[in-house]
Amino acid sequence: MMGHVFGGQAIVDRLKRSPAPRPGRIAEAWEVSDVDGHIGEVNEGPLAGESLRSLMLKYPEEVMGPGWSGDRFPILTKFIDATRSLPVHLHADDEDARTLEGEPNGKTEAWHILEAAAGATALVGVKPGVDAATLRDALVRGDYDAVMRRVPVRAGETIYVPAGTLHSFGPDTLAYEIEQTSNIQRSAMPWRIEDGSRLPEREWEKNLDMLLAEWKPEPRPDFHPGLSLPVGHDGERVICCAGPYFALERWRAAAGATARGSFGTAVIVSNVGSAVEIAVDEWRGKLGPGRSLLMPAALGEFRIAGPADVLLGYLPDLVSDVERPLAAAGYGPDVIATLHEGRSSH
């Protein structure tokens, strides 16, 4: 849990997460993480107390599926409460992470908006024609709208944010974030995210230098409602975003209905509705509001009993998990591409 200056109480008050994970302000609730210093642990069962990193080292194929050989879980998920606006910042891409930050990978991310006040907006990417000198001058002056794109934010929509894209969202916005496993970022703000205290001038200047070195001017993503797949009269399946690093779906099931899934890889289920029952074979368990569950690939098919409103995050086989079922439902390649490009198909 992170208590950064932009947080509030939405994760407890709106998501109904209980008990409160910590007193006071909560900016981020890290749901599934294999980030150094923030590695999750198994909460119950015979492996209780084992770290996610340990499971990845001991049982890589059981967690991620046949052929997996990575030593870290590749996806990080969070609930983010932007009661106040997030700092303007960016994350390095894979190449810059390795060469400039000494990290194994960068951070492409996506935000799925759970709640947003009327008129809410986000700053995402820069306007065409902005060069590095113009950008730095505007960042020093704090005139972000002079150089950045401001786009409307609506509940239920998702935006795919490639690494290197300058961004911020809030205030009064509650989001679910899925991203590469990484905690690297470069902020444009002259203050610390933890407490709002002023940075020394040299530290701020270094941050700006690194931000500009890692900045990618081309991405200008937009929010998208996602693409629906038919699941019958009592359910809804929306693919919110899908790219090489992660996919995110939102599943809803009416009372008395059952949603069934199997992806051949680990699936993170995060509950954004009331408590739901999840079953695998003969096992059944309750997932409370605002809670998440990591289901390893070895479990195979799972069942979610309605009423349910859940998010599913996973590392996709883009052809079999995304492109093929969407094409069968009548979506063309250009429309399917909006799931990671984030641009309108119109």
Image (tube, rainbow, N blue to C red):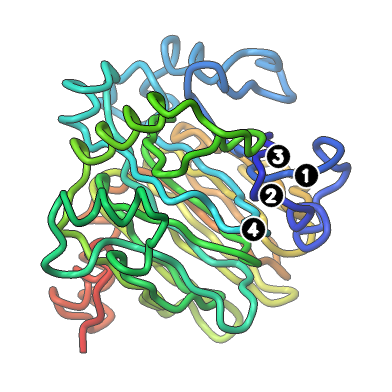
Q: Nearer the viewer, mark 3 or mark 4?
A: 4
Q: Could you classify mark 1 by the number of other residues whose Cα lies within 10 Å: few (under 14), some (14-19), or many (20 or more)?
A: some
* First in sequence: mark 2 vs mark 3: 2
Alpha carbon distance from label 2 to label 3:
36 Å
Disc 2 and disc 4 in contact, CB within 8 angstroms:
yes
Q: Nearer the viewer, mark 2 or mark 3?
A: 2
- On the image, the x and y values in percent for residue 133 come to 16, 50
Alpha carbon distance from label 1 to label 4:
11 Å
Element marked by disc 4: loop
Alpha carbon distance from label 2 to label 1:
6 Å
Q: Nearer the viewer, mark 3 or mark 1?
A: 1
> Can you tell which mark lies on residue 7?
2
Q: Is residue 308 above or below residue 321?
A: below
- The residue tagged 1 is 25
Disc 2 and disc 1 in contact, CB within 8 angstroms:
yes
Q: Which part of the image, by quadrant, shows the N terminus?
A: top right
Residue at 29 percent across and 28 percent down: it is 66
> Can you tell which mark lies on residue 162?
none
- The residue tagged 4 is 84
Amino acid type, callout 4: Arg
Q: Nearer the viewer, mark 1 or mark 4?
A: 4
- On the image, the x and y values in percent for residue 118 come to 62, 83
